Image (cartoon, rainbow, N blue to C red):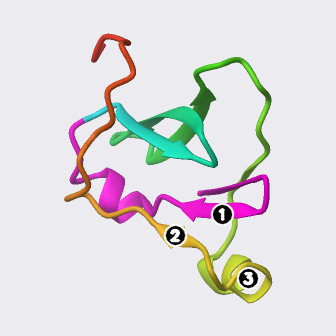
Amino acid sequence: MAVLIDGQAKAWPYSELAQSQLPVWDKLAGIELKISYNRESKYATVEVINGEPVAVSYSYWFAWASFFPDTQVYQATEQKIESGLPDK
């Protein structure tokens, strides 16, 4: 799963989300994001904290990376950002 915001791209591999404490709080192009992942259904979603809409791509990595080769890739070892929202 990946998003593109103001020319910045980031991907969250399901294999990394499966190892993460959920939800994952992240930030891209100054916008706070809440990444949720259902381990049972293996489906992820992105919620924009400040209410701005963001398009999410559910595609194969090779296809995404060919268009956005500078994509940041989330790793489960990244530290969560503080967003003020509860971990529920």
Return the residue nearer the eye: 82 or 43.
82
Label 1 with label 2: CB-CB less than 8 Å? yes
- Circle 2 residues within 10 Å: few <14, some 14–19, many ≥20: some
- Residue that numbered label 2 is attached to: 72
Give the percent coordinates (x, y) of residue 77: 19, 59
Residue shown at 34% from the left, 52% from the top = 17
Point out the frontmost of discs 3 and 2.
2
Give the mark, 3 or 1, whose residue is nearer the N terminus: 1
Query: What amino acid does circle 1 point to?
Result: Ala
Above or below for 77 versus 54: below
Q: Secondary structure at mark 3?
A: helix
Question: Which residue is labeled 1 in the image?
Answer: 9
Residue 88 in the image: x percent, y percent? 30, 13
The Cα–Cα distance between marks 3 and 2, rounded to whole angstroms, is: 15 Å
- Say if 9 sits above or below 88 in the image: below
Magenta span includes 18: yes
The residue segment tinted magenta is: 1-21
Earlier along the polypeptide chain: callout 3 or callout 2? 3
